[in-house]
Image (tube, helix red, strand yellow):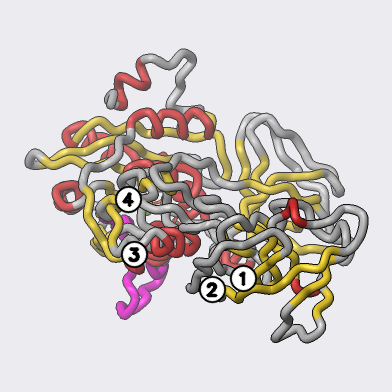
Amino acid sequence: MPSLSEVISCLSGYDPNAVPVAQAQQIIRDVVAPVQGVEKVAIRSALDRVLAQDIVSPINVPQHDNSAMDGYAVCGADLGAAGPTVLKVVGTVHAGGRFDGTLNPGECIRIMTGAPMPARCDTVVPQEFTEAADATNATAVTIPAGVVKTGDNRRLQGEDLMAGKPALFKGKRLRPADLGLLASLGFAEVPVQRRLRVAFFSTGDELRSIGEPLDAGCVYDSNRYTLYGMLTRLGCDIIDMGVVRDDPSALEQAFRTACENADAVITSGGVSVGEADYTKQMMATLGDVTFWKIGMRPGRPMAFGKISSNGRSAYLFGLPGNPVAVMVTFYFFARQALLRMMGADDAPLPLMRAVSASAIRKKPGRTEYQRGILTVGEDGLQRVRITGAQGSGILRSMSEANCMVVLHHEQGSVNAGDPVDVLLFEGLV
Ligand code: AMP
Ligand code: MG
């Protein structure tokens, strides 16, 4: 992987004081490399973990051609096209059983869903299309013309998963369907990437931890809790280092401890104009870190790079201090980088479209993230309205919202009724 300085030196028109969101995302993607380390875990423990190798199917699923319906297994060629066909019922086959006899022309076999297709049968006539004297113990059935085509209601061997073909690909975050799929192949364990270790701390002399008296002019540290939630959802092992004062030696010690113990370090606060100077000096001794002013709102200041201490290094995400800005910069920068470090597929955040319920003022030339509430009207249309005050310190706006309205870099003001992109919080990791 190229270093941050190398990546940046190749960019034309790069200005750390005016970095578009997409450029910052690209730089981070180019610099961050997946961590090494694979472990085998039981299927149930693999939920939300990242698959470390392609999984090739050792068997066909299903193992045999089988019936998709309860009914009668027939040879399609035996059915008359012009009028009803009467077939003799010569046996019954249940799921998990088999029929070993041979079928002669004019004969059929009663078959249940999931039962293997007997030899010579290629079609299943569903029970409800047939007429039998006595449905449960019929010796003959009448099949009207035209109710099935040859091959109907038959599941083919390997149609779900084919032996020798890849069933799941490396880099996938395993979802419930994948656990079931692995089970259907008979796997007890799967190889997954080791968990990422992420250390984080909050910076600021005004911060108090829960349980401490809230002195005048102070606020409780909330960022460590939003970070805890977001990192836990990503499946990281977390190291919560608490609050660190705005003191160069305390900060340096915290950065050193963090990068000696983690793959990534996330801090909040201390990167805004008034505070960045001494952080910058310290970073110059600890590694290759750049301080950005990103063309976005909220979340303009951010530091990114790699820091080292005692031969260990970690990627650093120095997020702004404001609680909403922490979440926005985490979701739009850190999340993608951490997933990449975890070896997960690089899927962009899934944005969807909704109609804006009101006009939104917006200047082209920066990306804005407004907190929104998405609802589905009786007309089936998805509408989004903004949650009141949008200050970057108003965490309530995030709590009330169920989505963020993403107003892209080039985009200008939005009229009521215009479509906008939204990022749903539901399901977001
Ligand atoms: P800073 O980026 O350090 O200048 O902080 C910007 C604003 O965010 C200030 O009002 C801080 O008090 C507030 N802030 C910083 N860190 C936290 C935190 N961990 N929890 C709550 N508010 C914070
Ligand atoms: Mg601060």
Q: Residues within 10 Å of mark 3 (few under 14, many from 20)?
A: some
The response on whether ligand 1 sits within 8 Å of label 4 is no
Query: Which residue is tagged 3?
Result: 43
How much space separates mark 2 and mark 3, taking CA atoms? 26 Å
Mark 4 or 3: the one toward you = 3
On screen, residue 117 versus residue 72, left or right, reads left
Q: Residues within 10 Å of mark 2 (few under 14, many from 20)?
A: few
Name the residue rendered at 29%, 23% in the picture: 2
Marks 2 and 4: in contact by CB < 8 Å? no
Compared to residue 303, the image places residue 395 above or below, namely below
**Amino acid type indicated by mark 3:** Ile
Q: Is residue 206 magenta?
A: yes
Query: Which residue is tagged 4?
Result: 266
Q: Earlier in the sequence, mark 2 or mark 3?
A: 3
Q: Earlier in the sequence, mark 4 or mark 3?
A: 3
Mark 2 or 3: the one toward you = 2
Query: Which residue is tagged 1?
Result: 113
Q: Earlier in the sequence, mark 1 or mark 3?
A: 3
Label 2: element kind: loop
Query: Which residue is tagged 2?
Result: 95
On screen, residue 136 versus residue 184, left or right, reads right
Write the start and end of the magenta stretch as one range. Answer: 198-221
Residue 111 figure quarter? bottom right
Q: Earlier in the sequence, mark 1 or mark 2?
A: 2
Name the residue rendered at 34%, 64% in the picture: 43
Name the residue rendered at 53%, 41% in the picture: 348
How much space separates mark 4 and mark 3, taking CA atoms? 31 Å
Mark 4 or 1: the one toward you = 1
